Amino acid sequence: MMELADACIEFLQETLEHYGEALNVYDRMMYEMNEQFWCLYGVDMESVLVKQESGTRAILPLFHKLNAYFYEEQELRYGKFHMHLHKVFAPHIVSYLEKEEATLREELDDALERETWLNENCTEDFSCCAVQDIVGLVKNNQKLVAELRWPDKTFSEHLQSRTQKTTADIFDCYVTKVYDVLRVYPRLQRGVITYNSVLPDEVCVMMNSCITVRLHANELCGNATNSNNSEYSYRTEINEQLSQRINTMFEFVCSQLSQCLVHLLYKLGRYDKDSIISHLYTMMGPKLAIVEPLFSHVRQNNVQIKQEIHPNSTSNLLLCWYNSLLTTIAEWLTERENIDMHHFQLVAISTIFKTLFSEFSSQGLTEEQLRNATYRMIHNRIEYEETMNTLNIDTTRNYAYGYSSDSSAD
């Protein structure tokens, strides 16, 4: 049918070229003749299309060729056969898109199975191999629909809306599946995280791939028209949805990294005044050096985040981790709301609190971000405990545990 279409187009073009001037006075007659000519072609075309497999890509070149020809011929554009052409091909196009949607989901699973999450396989925009594959496929799908140049506005908007929704669904599915992989990643499990643990490169690649997908969604999910004929933005919806999922991913990662602080606070809990072993640990001479490994852990991971995480989300991840650390401290203090803090606990918590403020301030977080509600709650509790302690303890005891800090969180 492609060869026959080429022959028909060539015949009509040659006829117009050689006899066009003489036949100008018979415009209406020539129009009817051309329509009848293409109707005869259509009989053979439809008999061939009926035999084609539903949703096959093989018919698309034929449609593109014929549709392009009728668009160029002003007399035939939107004529009887041109509109009939779209009516005949519409079911095939819909079937093809349905098959492509299923193929995209299969390709997504295959791409994730092949993915190694290695830095060296990522591009300059932080896209891993799986993202490159998926983005390439959805771009081709959208390009195909754009090149159809469907004359029926309603159906054209339906096709555009459908491809954008498919793109949004694929991107959302990708981020969800990556999060599932990240949650069970062996080096990110509780009990494995130690003071020497640094955020694994593979985890950074996973998070970067999701951030990159969100950026591609802004590009590929534009405005469409919904069933109520009102403008609808898939871009806004998918951006909010992906941002929420990425934030959940950040919170999980930060929660895992904060286990070092949880472990440290567990040790400090031994000095609770209502604890049986509190006096024993006090007699052993507590040293504030116990907090040093935590600060080293925080600094190493802050460097890793700054170097390996997509610049678009570095600050968001740092803020998420800072909030996670503060929340852990706040929960520990809340559990001891009705217990006077041991002096060593107070000095240790105050040192941790001030050093975290200083460390994350040096990473570029703003005063507004740092001095949030959780910060103020901890700050007020420390001030209260310090006031109560100064009634009974000489302030020189601040240096009694072999450590001093110049950091300030005032």
Image (spheres, grey):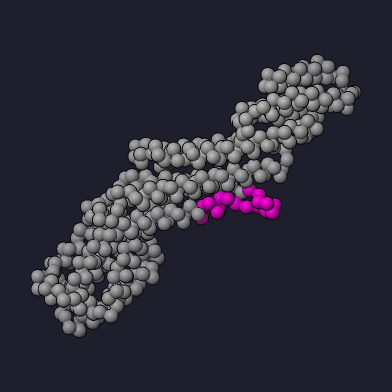
Seen in the picture, residue 393 relative to 118 is either above or below; the reply is below
Near-viewer residue (169 or 382): 169
Q: Residue 273: percent from the left, percent from the top?
A: 19, 78
Could you say which quadrant of the image residue 144 lies in? Answer: top right
Viewer can see residue 397? no
42 vs 361, left or right, is: right
Viewer can see residue 140? yes
Could you say which quadrant of the image residue 333 lies in? Answer: bottom left
The outermost residue toward the front is 51
Near-viewer residue (239 or 107): 107
364 vs 386, left or right, is: right
Q: Residue 210: percent from the left, percent from the top?
A: 43, 47
334 vs 213, left or right, is: left
Tell me what residue is drawn at x 16 percent, y 80 percent: 393
408 vs 157, left or right, is: left
Q: How many marks?
A: 0
Seen in the picture, residue 40 relative to 223 is either above or below; the reply is above
Near-viewer residue (246 or 369): 246
Q: Check residue 232 for magenta coloring.
A: yes
The outermost residue toward the right is 25
Q: Residue 137: percent from the left, percent from the top?
A: 52, 37
The outermost residue toward the top is 18
Q: Check residue 167 for magenta coloring.
A: no
- Over which residues does the magenta segment extend? 224-240
Tell me what residue is drawn at x 57 percent, y 37 percent: 99
Tell me what residue is drawn at x 84 percent, y 27 percent: 31
